[in-house]
Image: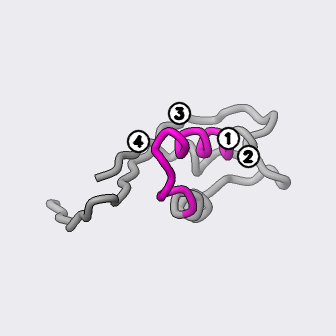
Amino acid sequence: TLQKMQLIKGDCIYVSTDGYADQFGGPKGKKFKYSQLEKLLLTIQDKKMEEQKELLKNAYDSWKGSLEQIDDVCIVGFRV
């Protein structure tokens, strides 16, 4: 179905695969989950896109630790 959204200059749009949210890790070896990914994106949305990329990569690597990557991981973001 067709969806329309009103965007305002400065808005950030993100599209991702499920790999980031589904990655196991952290202190209990559990999934990162979408709620945690959403919180992370909300905390970094005002930063420059290149900085966001580094923060996302560092958070993922820190969460994953020494565990194996289980899926493809892709997040595309752009600012209006």
Q: Is residue 42 magenta?
A: no
Q: Secondary structure at mark 4?
A: strand
CA neighbours of label 1 inside 10 A, class few (<14), some (14 to 19), many (20+): few
The correct choice, above or below, for 5 with respect to 31 in the image is below
Find numbered disc 1 in the image and state the secondary structure of the residue it sits on: helix
Q: What are the residue bounds of the magenta stretch?
A: 43-60
Q: Which disc number belongs to residue 58?
A: 1
Q: Is residue 58 magenta?
A: yes
In this figure, which residue is indicated by the disc labeled 2? 63
Q: In the image, what residue occupies the spot 35% across and 46% down?
A: 78
Q: Residue furthest right?
A: 27
Give the CA distance from mark 3 to mark 2. Answer: 15 Å
Q: Residue 20's spot in the image, x, y percent?
A: 57, 45
Considering only order in the chain, which callout, 4 or 1, is on the residue closer to the N terminus?
Answer: 1
Question: What residue lies at 40% left-to-right and 45% top-to-bottom?
Answer: 77
| Residue 48: image location, x then y, percent | 47, 47
Residue displayed at 27% across by 60% down: 9
What separation in Å lies between label 4 and label 3 (alpha carbons)? 13 Å
Q: Earlier in the sequence, mark 3 or mark 2?
A: 2
**Which three-letter amino acid code belongs to the residue tagged 4?**
Val
Q: Between tags 2 and 1, which lies in front?
A: 1
Residue 43, by quadrant, is bottom right
Name the residue beneath numbered marker 4.
76
Give the residue type at disc 3: Asp
Residue 18: % across, % down: 50, 47
In primary-sequence order, the first of circles 2 and 1 is 1
Q: Callout 2, which amino acid?
A: Trp
The mark closer to the camera, 4 or 3, is: 4
Report how far apart the C-alphas of labels 3 and 1 lie in the structure: 16 Å
Give the overall secondary structure of the magenta segment: helix
